Amino acid sequence: MYRQYLVKRILYGIVMYVILIFVFSLLFNATSEQTARSQIEEEVRLVGASLVNPTTEQVTRITEERRTELYRMYHLDRSLLERVFYRTWDTLTLRFGNSTIIKSSRGDREVGKIILEVIPRSLILFTTAVFCQLLIGLFLGLKKAQRAGGLLDRTTSVATMVVYGMPSWWLGMIMIMFLVYGIPLFPSGGLHSSPPPSGFLYTLDLFYHMALPLLTLLLIGSWGLSLLTRNIVLGVLQEDYIMAARARGLPERNVLFGHTLRTSAPPITTIAILSLLGSVSGNILFEGIFSWPGMGNLYWVAVEQNDVPVLMGLLSITTGLYICGLVLLDLIYGFLDPRIKVGGKA
């Protein structure tokens, strides 16, 4: 039964991903073809200009042959539906092509290399922040639930209401104002100093530049996660089997981690996995504030410069990661909560 459910969920995820990529290809088709036609006409003009003492008939014939060849190469001689299907297939097979304007730091125009260059930058900042938020939020949330209404619960709840509602970009600007210009402890932004150091100092310089945005993300995300964990765990602590476990004399640690946390695992796992998946795509405004050259910054530059191949590459990767995460969540729920009869009938 579980094997059938597993295969079904994976197939649903694949079908959904293909449909979304097809929709993205259809939406960006007009802009992509307009850019492709402009590039073709530019290349055709160069071909005509490279001829030595040509006649008008020769220029017309050669340029027309080259235009026809390029139109056939880019499938522009096909119907609209066929062109969209070709574009969808190229995206599904990770053949994103070359960017229109954007280049990597090494001057590469290949979309795959451009994206692979910025993904580690988003991972090292946002994924590290999510891991730290999860550790702090889970620990603080469990302690708040254990002593609901106590001093720790009341003070951290007030801090949650104050900090969690702040926009990340606004808090980032406040942190820069106080910890860069007021008290010069951190650099204002960027990935490295200019010029960057070498050797082990290169890594230290990276962590130094990452410290302020990481601290800002922790201040924003940890409080909200702790409040969610507290509310989830507090509801489970009122269950009869938890009271029965306490009545049997089990240590509070065993009750909290062996019974309560296991039952609370599905919603907490959902939050954790979705947060980790979201960390890959970066944050456009936050990266702009701290001049962090990650996925969010690449999104903004691609939109600003209308670089459709880069946008399609970014959308396909982030969409695929989200769908994989959702399928993974469905598959592990049955292991985390034995009350869930996966794939069963009522």
Image (cartoon, grey):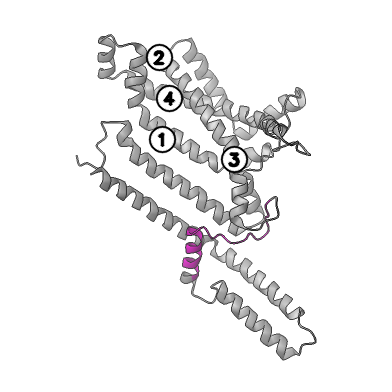
- Amino acid type shown at disc 2: Gln
Q: With 144 as the anchor, is 170 left or right in this view? A: right
Where residue 243 sits in the image (x, y, percent)?
A: 27, 14
Residue under the image location 60 percent in, 33 percent down: 168
The answer to whether mark 3 and mark 1 are in CB contact below 8 A is no
> Helix, strand, or loop for circle 4?
helix
Q: Which residues are magenta?
A: 83-104
Q: CA distance from mark 1 to mark 4?
A: 12 Å
| N-term-proximal mark, 4 vs 3 | 3
Q: Looking at the image, is 51 positioned above or below residue 173?
A: below
Q: With 128 as the anchor, is 46 left or right in this view? A: right
Residue holding disc 4: 229
- Amino acid type shown at disc 3: Ser
Q: CA distance from mark 1 to mark 2?
A: 22 Å
| N-term-proximal mark, 3 vs 1 | 3
Residue holding disc 2: 146
| N-term-proximal mark, 3 vs 2 | 3
Residue 40 highlighted magenta (yes or no): no
Q: Looking at the image, is 155 positioned above or below residue 92?
A: above
Q: Is residue 283 visible?
A: no
> Helix, strand, or loop for circle 1?
helix
Q: Quadrant of the C terminus?
A: top left
> Helix, strand, or loop for circle 3?
helix
Q: CA distance from mark 3 to mark 2?
A: 35 Å
- Amino acid type shown at disc 4: Thr
| N-term-proximal mark, 4 vs 2 | 2
Q: Residue furthest right?
A: 53
Where residue 185 sits in the image (x, y, percent)?
A: 73, 24
